[in-house]
Amino acid sequence: MNYLQQANEFAKKHNVSMKINSVNYGKHFSDDKESRYIFNITLKRNRKQYTFNFGQSLASGSEEPTMYDILSNLEKYESRDFEDFCSNYGYDTDSIKALKTYKAVDREYKSVNRLFGDVMEELQKIQ
């Protein structure tokens, strides 16, 4: 089974829908050198939803993200704390940028866990 099929089957099995709400063009990350297409996405599952911005890869241009693109890029692993996060991802614990990144990743993980907590192990296989 290929990666796209795996993501689509996961979505079907777990009643996940994806909606593109809007598209913008600009800098997605604070240190982006080039602009990219930024899609505002809503994932829905079992009366819960999560809305977020997804910065498309530069190579994909304006191409709409697939279910695989979205599911494979969600934060599916919890960091115990800021020091753990820095250790795992190579950030300096004395960095304001690292702290902002940690807080954003932690918020995303909590949203993903709220939506997929009961099937997180299966979601983690989509990489």
Image (cartoon, grey):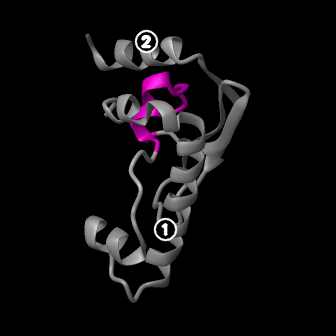
Residue at horizontal 45%, vertical 14%?
8
Q: Is residue 99 left or right of residue 40?
A: left
Q: CA distance from mark 2 to mark 1?
A: 31 Å
The answer, for residue 60, to whether it is visible in the render is no
Residue at horizontal 53%, vertical 44%?
113
In the picture of the structure, the residue carrying the numbered disc 1 is 101
Residue at horizontal 42%, vertical 25%?
68
Q: Position of residue 41 (x, y in %)?
A: 65, 35
Q: Which amino acid is tagged 2?
A: Glu
- Which residue, as the protein is rendered here, is positioned at the far front? 118
Q: Is residue 21 left or right of residue 85?
A: right
Residue at horizontal 52%, vertical 34%?
116
Q: Secondary structure at mark 2?
A: helix
User: Crowding near pointer 2: few (<14 within 10 Å), some, many (20+)?
Assistant: some
Which is nearer the eye, 24 or 3? 3
Q: Position of residue 97 (x, y in %)?
A: 48, 77
Which is nearer the eye, 58 or 122? 122
Total label count? 2
Position above or below: 26 against 94: above
Q: Is residue 99 left or right of residue 45?
A: left
In the picture of the structure, the residue carrying the numbered disc 2 is 9
Q: Earlier in the sequence, mark 2 or mark 1?
A: 2
Question: Which of the 4 image quarters holds residue 123?
Answer: top left
Q: Which amino acid is tagged 1?
A: Thr
Q: Which residues are magenta?
A: 57-74
Position above or below: 118 against 104: above
Residue 62 inside the magenta-drawn segment: yes
Position above or below: 69 against 16: below
The answer, for residue 109, to whether it is visible in the render is yes
Q: Quadrant of the C terminus?
A: top left
Q: Position of residue 86 (x, y in %)?
A: 33, 73
- Find out whether the residues at labels 2 and 1 contact each other: C-beta distance under 8 Å: no
